[in-house]
Amino acid sequence: MKRINEYKKLFQVTGEIDLNEIKKTYRNLVKEWHPDQFHNDEAKLQEAELKGTQIIDAYHFLISIAPATKASNLEEYNEVTIVSGIDDFKHKGLKLEVTFMNGAVYEYFGVSPNLYKKLINADNQLRFAKRNIFHSYLYRRAKKEVLQEA
C-alpha cells in the first residue's frame, strides 16, 4: 500500500485513477525530468535518471491498477481465477503474489499476514482464495504467462 500511495502522490492522483490524466501527467513528468536537460550538472543528471526510472515504474503500476484497465481485463481475470489452479504463492508485507497453473501471476495488495496464514492452512487453497482474496483486494497482473516447453 505504501508503494501505491507514493506513486499516486508522484502523479498527483487523489481519487480514482483516470487513464487520460495519468498519461498526461506522465508526459509532463518525463519532460520535466528528462536527463538531456541536466547534461551540465552531474548531480542533477543522476537525480533525473533515478526520477525517470521511478516515473516509468509508477506509470506502468498505476495503469495496471486503474479501474478501466481492470474492467477491460475482467473476463480474462475471471477465467484465470476460476479455471486455472494455484501453482504457487508468496507473501511479503501486505502483498500476496499468486502464480496460477497457466503461468499468470497476480499481485494482491493489503493481504494481512493473518489472512495469509488462513490461506496456507486452508483445506482447499483455491476455494479459500476465491472466497476471500480474488475479488476482495486490489490486484494487478504482475507477469505474463511463461511458455512451457513440451
Image (tube, helix red, strand yellow):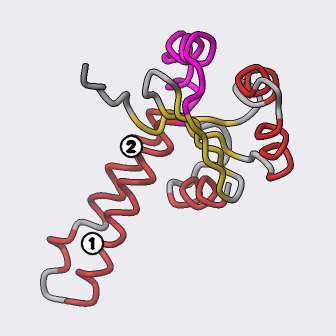
- Magenta span has 85? yes
Q: Position of residue 138 (x, y in %)?
A: 67, 36
Amino acid beneath label 1 = Glu
Q: Amino acid at mark 2?
A: Lys
Residue contact at pointers 2 and 1, CB within 8 angstroms: no
Main SS type for the magenta part? helix
Tell me which numbered mark, 2 or 1, is placed earlier along the sequence: 2
Residue holding disc 2: 24
Residue under the image location 53 percent in, 23 percent down: 68
Q: Position of residue 132 (x, y in %)?
A: 81, 28
Front residue (pair 132, 41): 132
- Residue 81 pos. (x, y %): 61, 18
Which mark is nearer the camera, 2 or 1? 1
Q: Is residue 148 left or right of residue 80?
A: left
Determine crowd level at label 1: few under 14, some 14-19, many 20+ residues with C-alpha closer than 10 A: some
What number of labels is visible?
Answer: 2
**Which segment did they paint magenta?**
65-87
Left or right: residue 30 compared with residue 98: left
Q: Which mark is residue 111?
A: none
Is residue 105 part of the magenta span, yes or no? no
Of the pair 29 and 85, the residue shown nearer to us: 85
Q: Position of residue 75 (x, y in %)?
A: 54, 9
Mark 1: which secondary structure?
helix
Which is nearer the eye, 127 or 35? 127
Q: Which mark is residue 49?
A: 1
Disc 2 on helix, strand or loop? helix
Tell me what residue is drawn at x 39 percent, y 40 percent. 23
Q: Quadrant of residue 97?
A: top right
Q: How far, Cα to Cα, is label 2 from label 1?
A: 20 Å
Crowdedness of circle 2 by 10 Å Cα count: few (<14), some, many (20+)?
Answer: few
